[in-house]
Image (cartoon, rainbow, N blue to C red):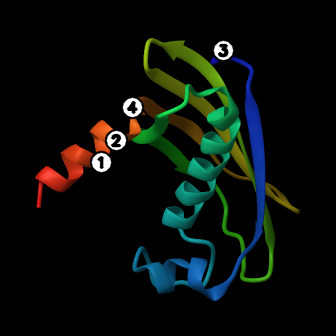
Amino acid sequence: MLAPGRQATVEETVTEDMTAQRLGSGDVPVLGTPAILALVEAAAVTAVAEALDPGTTSVGASVELDHLAPTPVGGTVTATAALAEVEGRRLTFRFEVTDAAGPVARGTHVRVVVDRERFLDTARERR
């Protein structure tokens, strides 16, 4: 059942492919904001995966992200997403990303529960 309180955590070691420099979101070799968002989304997906009805999935709809501190290549980051609100198909998560030195990012992420096949049909129609 989808109810507030569900949460999940993912952990990654920062690689060159995750840097702002490599992702095109900056010119420094530290964890890039797009990589942070990917980690947050992975945590949110994991938090609700087992509670979704068969044939449904959740898709990202919006994010508010404050990137607070840099994490170097080789550092480990942990992203935790907790389901804070359920409004029909709309799921709002609060998240925090940390490394060994403390907070790296925090914010909110909204996902929407969709019928997987109908969603994919819509994507195919957009070709």
Q: Amino acid at mark 3?
A: Ala
| Residue at figure coordinates x 79%, y 82% from the top left | 74
Q: Secondary structure at mark 3?
A: loop
1 w.r.t. 73: above or below: above
Residue beneath disc 4: 114
- Marks 2 and 3, how far apart at CA: 24 Å
Q: Amino acid at mark 2?
A: Glu
Asked if residue 126 lies left or right of residue 33, the reply is left
Q: Nearer the viewer, residue 29 or 81?
A: 81
Disc 3 to disc 1, how far (Cα)? 26 Å
Few, some or many residues within 10 Å of mark 3 (<14, 14–19, 20+): few
Q: Which residue in the structure is indicated by mark 2?
A: 117
Please tell me which residue is depicted at 63% across the width and 20% down the height of the picture.
84
Of 70 and 97, nearer the camera is 97
Give the x, y percent position of residue 90: 44, 22
Gap between marks 1 and 2, in whole Å? 5 Å
Report the Cα–Cα distance between label 2 and label 4: 9 Å
**Residue position marked by numbered label 3 in the rendering:** 3
